Amino acid sequence: MPAATPGPTPTPSLLAVFAHPDDESLAAGGTLARHATAGARTAVVTATWAADTVRVTELAQALRILGAGPPRLLGYADARVPQSAPGAARFCDAPIDGPVRELVAQLREFRPQLVLTHDAYGGLSGHPDHVHTHRVTLLACQAAGLERLYPDAGAPWQPRALYTATHPHSAVREWGRRLAATDKATRTVPDEWVTAAVDVRPWLEQKVAAVLAHRTEVERGAVPGLIAGLAPSDREALLRTEWYIRHELVPDQAPDQAPGRAAQAMQTELMA
């Protein structure tokens, strides 16, 4: 009797953690839409802004477009916008144990295989909330699988890998040229550091629609506003690729696994 042919590998579940409403669409909207289309569970945790604000209403619309479920909020105040969460601590000022515990609870409840967040620079802008989100997410991913850390936050769950959204030096030709007019510095990494370059052109329409759902940022001339003013071909040039650096969270459980097979799995889990 012939051996059974293995079925397709299920698309990994994915939880994205970003600082502000609109970060999810700009940094990972295509990846989120691609995984949702393939049938994976996807969700987004946003560190700042309160539930009863216009920005979160816009976030909910963007997540519906991307197929990423309702907003999951930590509820801290944006470092530069105190009214984003009246009465709440600024995210960067809160003792780090608080948001780490809250994110551990989200990880244990959703139980993702992969986690996405900002890179150590905080992306191109280097916003302090982005940098802090990177730190909190890294700590929470390490803590979530340890049963004696935050035992009141749910049963332990260890994500397989953390992917940090980044931009290689080569991307500065597009992004740097666009952002030069806004007088913003750009923070990029060596191209060889990039683990996955995800082609999101088939999901570009969803990604752009999600970005533009953040009307407040469009109207004030932030990056969504810049994108709103571009021709479709320029939007594609800017948004067609999403780059990530992979960080292993689980030690190899099969020491005899062929290195080539492990590398292939690493390259395909984000469907790059």
Image: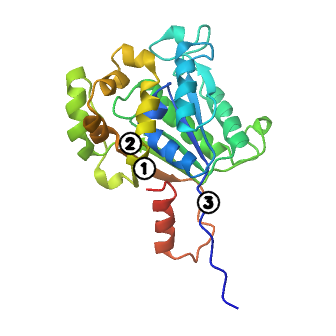
- The C terminus, quarter of image: bottom left
- Element marked by disc 1: strand
Q: Are marks 2 and 1 in contact (CB under 8 Å)?
A: yes
Foreground residue, 152 or 170? 170
Frontmost residue, 272 versus 184? 272
Q: Which mark is residue 166?
A: 2
Sequence-wise, the earlier of marks 2 and 1 is 2
- The x, y position of residue 248, in whole percent, is 53, 55
User: Distance from label 1 to label 3 (Cα)?
Assistant: 22 Å
Q: Amino acid at mark 3?
A: Pro
The x, y position of residue 268, in whole percent, is 48, 61
Which mark, by number, is residue 10?
A: 3
Nearest to the observer: residue 98 or residue 195: 195
Query: What type is the residue that disc 1 sits on?
Result: Ile
Measured in 3D between alpha carbons, the distance from the residue under mark 2 to the one under mark 1, in whole angstroms, is 7 Å
Whether residue 118 is visible here, answered yes or no, is no
Which element carries disc 3, helix, strand or loop? loop
Left/right of residue 193 with respect to residue 145 in the rendered view: left
Q: Is residue 260 above or below residue 204?
A: below
Q: For the point 47% across and 12% down, which residue is it?
A: 81
Nearest-to-viewer mark from 3 and 2: 3
- The quarter of the displayed image where residue 85 is located: top right
Q: Which quarter of the figure has residue 228?
A: top left
State the count of labels. Answer: 3
Query: Viewer-proximal residue, 248 or 34?
Result: 34
Q: Is residue 125 left or right of residue 148?
A: left
What distance separates the C-alpha of mark 3 from that of mark 2? 25 Å
What mark, if any, has residue 245 been given in the picture?
A: 1
